[in-house]
Image (spheres, rainbow, N blue to C red):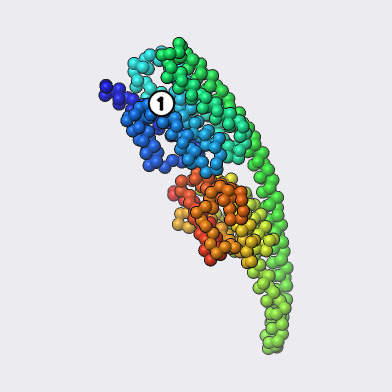
Amino acid sequence: MDITYVIISFAVFFTQISVITVLYQQISGITIRWYSYIGIIFFNVALFLIAPPIGYFFTYLFWLGYSLYKDRSHNRPLAVFYGLYPVVIENLFNRVMAFYIFPTMGISLKMMEQYPVLNVLIELLILPLSYGVTRSIQLDFRNLQLGFEKRYLDRTLIVVDISMAIYCIVLQILLLTDDLIPNAAVYREKLVGAYVIFFLIILIYLNSKFSDKLQAEILQQKDIQLAELAKHSQHIEKLYEEIRSFRHDYVNVLMSIQSGLELRDLDAIQRVYDTVLSKTVTQFSDQKYDIASLSRISNIAVKSVLSAKLREAHEKRIKLEIEIEENLNLSVIDTLDIVTILSILLDNAIEATLLTKRPILKFAFFHHNGYLVCIVENSTLQETVSRSDIFKKGYSTKGNSRGIGLTKVMEILDRYPNASIQTRSSHYSFSQVIKLKEPTN
């Protein structure tokens, strides 16, 4: 076998796998670490060199299997979509250039067969072409990811999955029966032309629908945030009035103490302490004043969700311990993601601690050693809670079909390579510690 042909074939396949890997990360939002990225490419290339037919078909099936394996939400149609999309996009743009773009420049299919190095050029042009097309149709991959995760248009997603599977199967049939079916190349060209139009239209449709639904959800969320902020402002105003009233009365208290001291009347001083000062200690140690520390958070969405959850806990007579650092920088994580995480963790903590005789909820938000740290801790009915199953969908210590929230937390954190969550449980206490690595300047 010609060594030049082997080298070029290797280069084509290597570039193809690299392109598909990038497309997979783009559509799924899952970041593949560099060592896994290199391992995936070399594994596919090695398999292709050892057994070319197996390696060829394995390229189509690998990402489907990988996507199903990474599917934490058990949304199988979405996992299938993520697995087939990069393969189909690579294939479509490859053949669009071969069938439609290159011939306009005088490069025919026969020339590509004679000079296989042109296939390397095609693979190298796929990502720029894909980028240009997605920009021209204003395709927002983040919208697609959020829309799919929220299970908008599930039936449409299933139709898209089926269409991609049919496209791949029919294309392979036409390739394998090229010598048996007259004009098989023409059929392939028509299949590619028709499907690329269909696929782009369906992507535009999904992007448009998801954008509308997400925008409506954002507007609704903003209304909720404004309502919660109004309640928070009323809460702060009420506390301010209490403090102002106390400040006015405090002058009279000091004058009473001063009179007692001048007369050396210890009984009078004791009466002032018992009737006024002792109650003041109790009054101003109330946890409702701790909630006022939310004013240290500048992010309106985060402040509103924390205000709602912590006031709910206060109203349910849960003992609160709150620590929030000044000037928190939350730019390390998307606002919607941190709001979702906080809502889930606090909802779980409130629900769990209400089952105990002494409900306690501790919340901390601060920077430490280059990390943004969030801690949610609550008292538990059991001395220890098993940590091995809590992130499995459907698992809950509080009953069936209740464990969806923590699965969602894991899905979100998976999108941040430098994020981690630590779970601890002992002595009737359960805590979740989330750390997000902050960018270095």
Instruction: Provide residue 49's location: percent of width, then percent of height.
Output: 32, 29
State the residue at coordinates (61%, 30%): 156
How many marks do you count on the picture? 1
Residue 51 figure quarter = top left
Determine whether 238 is above or below 112 in the image.
below
Of 13 and 281, nearer the camera is 13
Instruction: Provide residue 343's location: percent of width, then percent of height.
Output: 61, 51
Instruction: Provide residue 435's location: percent of width, then percent of height.
Output: 49, 53
Residue 252 figure quarter = bottom right
State the residue at coordinates (52%, 61%): 425
Dot 1 crowding, Cα within 10 Å, few <14, some 14–19, many 20+ = many
Quadrant position of the N terminus in the picture: top left
Element under disc 1 = helix
State the residue at coordinates (55%, 28%): 162
Residue 100 seen anywhere in this rendered image of the structure: no
Residue bearing the label numbered 1:
123
Instruction: Provide residue 185's location: percent of width, then percent of height.
Output: 45, 14
